[in-house]
Amino acid sequence: MKGVDIGSPVLYRNVPVGFVQSYDLKDRGLFIHVLIEARYQHLVNKSSRFWHVSGLKLEGDLRNFRVDMASMKSLISGGITFSTGRPDAQSIESGTRYTLFSDQAMALSGDQQIEIAFDRAEGLREGTSIRFRGVEVGRVTRLLVNREQKGVTVKALIDSDKSWLMRKGVHFWLVEPKLGLARTANLDTLIIGPFINVEMPDIPGPKATEFIGQHREPDDIPKIKGLVIELVSQSLGSIQRGSPVYYRDVPVGEVTGYRLDNPANQVIISVNIEDRYRRLVSSESRFWNVSGIDIDVGLFRGTRIRAESLEALLAGGIAFSTPEKPERPIKSGHRFDLAHEPKKNWLLWRPEIWLH
């Protein structure tokens, strides 16, 4: 352990109550043997949590900083500190093992430990934040190579009051900055670093502690509440996650994902129409691709360039039109064909559809 050596102090509320006696390396990790003085042994029980306080620690980003310095002795030589949450908890015997956390936040975050399997460790590290709708609910404590599954197992702690997140079917994925000519996203991660996002399914399953993580957002999670439909296309083209969906050149939804159908002779594109615009869609609606530039050159007609918007020109997009006021609203999961380009009469439809 960096900064911890034989003789390093063990602190309780910044008071030395013991010291590091020895350490040895075993197959399952580094074991540090600590001796607590007899008069202070009652301070340690089943509820105790230990963490590393060696050296001067600076934490923060461009918005704020925190300086953490336990004691002058630990600043120079390194040390360990601990906290006991319940003085009346069960007592322990010599040889009891504890996890040594890297900082106080991890040590006191709760007892809810989970494992998340990723195919690679890129973008992940110890201390990576786990967030639910923008709120931190846990942190990564360790990264382990998984020989059997040829991937990486992420060990993490979930705050004790967020244990309801530990359900089968919960989605975990890594959020990283995306920079490109057409579309940028997650720029805050350039400052705060990548983090793991977690989202609950519509119907949570039973309690679980092992999950599968992804390096991108799953396709079946709607970004916003609304109408979820599927478009069937011969190819994906320039459509991507986040591509806008237009009605009369107004963005009313976006592409949330895509996949190959089974059999794989066509592509299924998932679209989420915002709830306030769901009345615009009927079973007779027609959808078409507006990605890229359509150039029509004629000797006497001149040149015509068509693009729904600069955003669609660069990032890809989908447009749709509805022939008349819908009589019955459609349900989520309805499928439409995605045309390569619109028919002329589609562009002439002008139904009076009240949004609310």
Image (cartoon, rainbow, N blue to C red):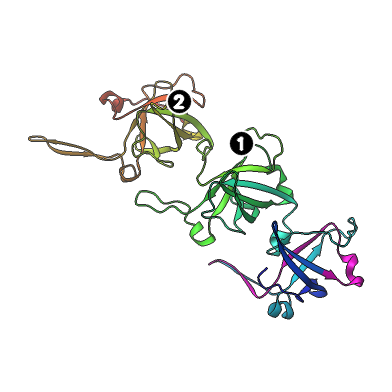
**Residue at screen point 47% across, 24% down:** 334
Position above or below: 213 against 125? above
Residue marked by disc 2: 262
In the image, residue 310 lies at what x, y percent? 31, 45
Q: Residue lying at the far top in this picture: please name it.
A: 327
Q: Is residue 43 magenta?
A: yes
Taking depth in this image into account, of 280 and 319 the one nearest to the observer is 319
Position above or below: 76 against 309? below
Answer left or right for 299 relative to 326. left
* Mark 2 Cα-neighbour bin, 10 Å: few <14, some 14–19, many ≥20: few
**Residue at screen point 45% across, 28% down:** 230
Element carrying mark 2:
loop
Taking depth in this image into account, of 222 and 1 the one nearest to the observer is 1
In the image, residue 286 lies at what x, y percent? 36, 25
Q: Find the distance from the CA under tag 2 to the CA under tag 1.
A: 24 Å
Answer left or right for 319 relative to 65. left
The amino acid on which the numbered mark 1 sits, given as a three-letter code, is Pro
Q: Residue lying at the far left in this picture: please name it.
A: 300
Picture quadrant of residue 64:
bottom right
The reply to whether residue 134 is in sight is yes
Q: Which range is magenta?
A: 35-62
Q: Is residue 65 magenta?
A: no
Please name which of the two marks, 2 or 1, marks the residue nearer to the observer.
2
Circle on res. 228? none
Give the mark nearest the N terminus, 2 or 1: 1
* Mark 1 Cα-neighbour bin, 10 Å: few <14, some 14–19, many ≥20: some
Residue marked by disc 1: 201
Answer left or right for 170 relative to 94. left
In the image, residue 349 lies at what x, y percent? 32, 25
